[in-house]
Amino acid sequence: MDKERRGAPSRRNFLLAVGAGSVAAAAAVISGGSPPSQESSPKDKTAGQGYRLTDHVRNYYRTAQI
């Protein structure tokens, strides 16, 4: 009878496998590290200039007044 039970999957074994899989997945995500940083390219001249009041922003402010 013990041999028959060992071959059949049980709810307990399933839950143990799911728990172990979750821990392994979390470890894989954590050990993956951060994505590579993107350095600013010379093409991106607007980076770091901050807020600029342009025509379309002025138009938005004009139309959004209460």
Image: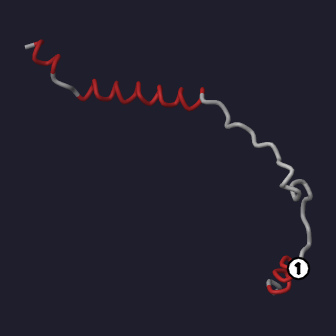
Q: Position of residue 3 (x, y in %)?
A: 11, 12
Q: Quadrant of residue 4?
A: top left
**Element type at mark 1:** helix
Q: Which quadrant of the rendered structure holds the C terminus?
A: bottom right
Counting every numbered tag in the picture gives 1
Q: Who's the residue at 40% across and 28% down the image? A: 19
Q: Would you call the spot at circle 1 few (<14 residues within 10 Å), some (14-19), or many (20 or more)? A: few
The reply, left or right, for residue 16 in relation to residue 57 is left
Q: Quadrant of residue 51?
A: bottom right
Q: Which quadrant of the rendered structure holds the N terminus?
A: top left
Q: Who's the residue at 41% across and 28% down the image? A: 21
Residue ranking furthest to the top = 2
Residue in front for this viewpoint, 57 or 39 = 39
**Image coloring type:** secondary structure
Q: Who's the residue at 88% across and 57% down the image? A: 45
Q: Is residue 2 above or below residue 39?
A: above
Q: Please name the amino acid that badge 1 sits on.
A: Asp
Q: Position of residue 43 (x, y in %)?
A: 84, 54
Residue in front for this viewpoint, 22 or 35 = 35
The reply, left or right, for residue 29 in relation to residue 60 is left
Q: Who's the residue at 44% across and 30% down the image? A: 22
Q: Is residue 38 above or below residue 8?
A: below
Q: Is residue 46 above or below residue 58?
A: above
Q: Position of residue 29 (x, y in %)?
A: 56, 32
Residue in front for this viewpoint, 50 or 18 = 50
Q: Position of residue 35 (x, y in %)?
A: 67, 37
Residue ranking furthest to the front = 43
Residue ranking furthest to the left = 1
The reply, left or right, for residue 61 in relation to residue 11 is right
Residue that mark 1 sits on: 55
